[in-house]
Image (cartoon, rainbow, N blue to C red):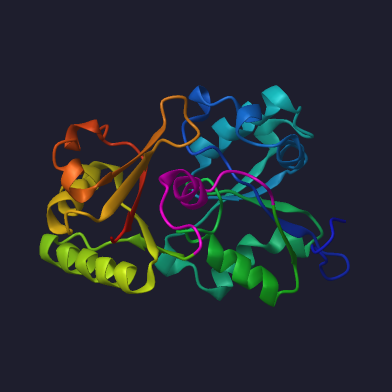
Amino acid sequence: MTAGAASRPGSGRLLLVPTPLADVASTPLPQVLPLGTLQAAANLEHWIVENAKTTRAFLGAVHAVCALRVPLQQHRLAVLPKHERLDASAARALLEPALAGHDIGLVSEAGAPCVADPGALVVARAHELGLGVLPLVGPSSVLLALMASGLDGQCFAFHGYLPVDEQARRTRLQALERESSQRRQTQLFIETPYRNAALLRALAHGLRADTRVSVACELTAPQGFVRTRTAAQWRDELSLLPPRVPAMFALLAG
C-alpha cells in the first residue's frame, strides 16, 4: 500500500484520479498524466463520477495507453448527486464498494478532483469512515494557471464562482482587488464558460487600470494559453478570449 494511504483493515481506498482539462480526444494522455496515474486508473473497476459519458471517454483513452484490468462495460460508475443532495447518507452509499474491500476512483469535470466540485464531500465522508484517501498526480487548473500567470505564487486564494448579478459581481471584484492590494495576494476564480466574456469585461472595466489580470484557457489542450495583462490593456484585447471555453481568471492589484 502506498505510504500515507492507510485505511482500516479489510477496506478499499478512495483514489482521487485527475483527468485532462480539455477533451480527451484532443489531449494525448501521456502528455498530461504520469504513467503511475494511468496505471492506477486502469486497475480500478468502481468509480464515483460527475458525468458518466465523459468518464467512459476518459477510460477509453486510458485503455489505449494501459489496458484496463476489466472491460470498460463492466466498470461500475456511480454518478454524484447534486451538491445539495449529497448528505452523509448519500456519500456513504457511494463509498459502499470501498467498505466492501474494493478501491474506488473519484473523477471530476475539473481536472483535479475535489477542487471546486462536490467530490470534497465524498472525501470528507471517507475520512469519517476510516477509509484511505490517495490523491494521484495530474493537472490542477488552479495551480497551472497560477504557475503561468506571473502573479504572486507565495500568497494566493481561490474563490470558485463569483456572483452572476452584474452589480454583485462588480462589488465582489472590487473587494477582491482591495484584499489583493492589502495582502499582496493573488485572487483566482472561475466562471461558467458562456459567461466568461462578461466576466473579462467586468475585470477590464471595473478594476484599477494597473491591476494585472491573467486568463488561462483550455489548459492541457494544444490550443490552450495563458495571457496576463493590466486591466487597461485587456480593454483593447477582449476579443482574444475564445468563446465558451473553460478558463481560470486571476488578478493581482498593483
- Residue 156 location (% of width, % of height): 44, 64
Q: Quadrant of residue 157?
A: bottom left
Q: How many marks?
A: 0
Q: Is residue 164 above or below residue 69?
A: below
Q: Nearer the viewer, residue 213 or 61?
A: 213
Region in magenta = 136-154
- Residue drawn at 18 percent across, 37 percent down: 238
- Residue drawn at 67 percent across, 32 percent down: 72
Magenta region includes residue 140:
yes
Magenta region includes residue 34:
no
Q: Quadrant of residue 196?
A: top left
Q: Nearer the viewer, residue 73 or 179?
A: 179
> Does residue 46 appear to the left or right of 141 in the view shown?
right
- Residue drawn at 70 percent across, 37 percent down: 34
Q: Nearer the viewer, residue 16 or 209?
A: 209
- Residue drawn at 73 percent across, 30 percent down: 71
- Residue 95 location (% of width, % of height): 67, 62
Q: In the orientation shown, which residue stands out farthest toward the bottom?
A: 128
Residue 96 visible somewhere in the drawing: yes
- Residue 239 location (% of width, % of height): 18, 32
Residue 199 visible somewhere in the drawing: no
- Residue 192 location (% of width, % of height): 30, 48
Quarter that holds the C terminus: bottom left
Quarter that holds the N terminus: bottom right
